[in-house]
Image: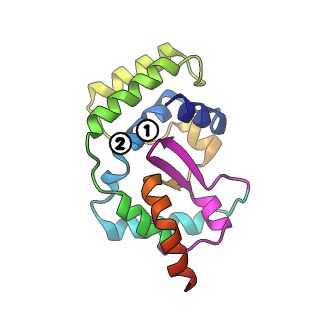
């Protein structure tokens, strides 16, 4: 997990404890909480993608764990990849994950060990944020205000193993190969 945390810290030096909680949740549970209304999820993706400026300088994906990544919408748009392809991959990856709760606890422990060293926030700030979060129950959260202001995040989080496996077939399908 250190490699994933190191990558996230390098990509997002403004990361706060709240953003690490979001990352842990996404790595453990994916985006299953967004699947309640597939039509609304598709419309939200379409709106977000159209509002997002293309940026070829962004990485297309960011690994969060061995089987989960975020797909950067600015890089996706810059590459000229189809919205429908991303939407399909996202919906396929939203299925509930086995052992999500156990995975979440392991990811929290990894951040416990990295706070104040690999990550750009103190262990005390992390412990305080984590305690307050857990007191209200495990749930998805939004990025911190500092992260949103600095990063203007726009991404989707399909499982990378599913995305990688689907990529060749999807490319052929979308390009008519």
Magenta run includes residue 21: no
Q: Residue furthest right?
A: 57
Residue 141 seen: no
- Residue 17 as seen in the image, left or right of residue 152: left
- Would you name the residue on which mark 1 appears? 22
Q: Quadrant of residue 7?
A: top right
8 on left or right of 138:
right
The circle drawn on residue 140 is: 2
Nearest to the observer: residue 109 or residue 134: 109
Q: Nearer the viewer, residue 50 or 20?
A: 20
Residue 98 lies, in percent from the top left, at: 26, 45
Q: Does the residue at mark 2 contact the one at mark 1 (Cβ under 8 Å)? A: yes
127 in relation to 13, above or below: above
In the displayed structure, 44 sits above or below 121; it is: below
Q: Is residue 97 above or below residue 165?
A: above
Number of numbered discs: 2
Disc 2 and disc 1: Cα gap in Å? 7 Å
Query: Can you name the residue that lies furthest to the bottom here?
Result: 176
Callout 2: helix, strand or loop? loop
Q: Nearer the viewer, residue 63 or 126?
A: 63
Q: Which residues are magenta?
A: 57-84
Q: Nearer the viewer, residue 152 or 177?
A: 177
């Amino acid at each position: 997990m250190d490699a994933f945390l190191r990558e996230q810290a390098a990509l997002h030096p403004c990361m706060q404890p709240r953003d690490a909680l979001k990352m842990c949740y996404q790595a453990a549970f994916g985006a299953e909480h967004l699947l309640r209304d597939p039509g609304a999820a598709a419309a939200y993706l379409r709106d977000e993608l159209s509002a997002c400026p293309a940026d070829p300088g962004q990485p297309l994906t960011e690994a969060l764990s061995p089987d989960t990544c975020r797909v950067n919408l600015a890089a996706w748009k810059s590459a000229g990849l189809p919205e429908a392809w991303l939407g399909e991959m996202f919906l396929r990856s939203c299925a509930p994950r086995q052992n999500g709760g156990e995975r979440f606890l392991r990811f929290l422990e990894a951040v416990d060990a990295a706070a104040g060293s690999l990550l750009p926030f103190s262990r005390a700030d992390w412990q305080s944020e984590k305690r307050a979060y857990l007191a209200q129950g495990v749930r998805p959260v939004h990025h911190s205000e500092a992260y949103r202001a600095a990063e203007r995040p726009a991404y989707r989080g399909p499982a990378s193993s599913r995305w990688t496996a689907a990529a060749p077939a999807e490319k052929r399908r979308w390009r008519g190969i």
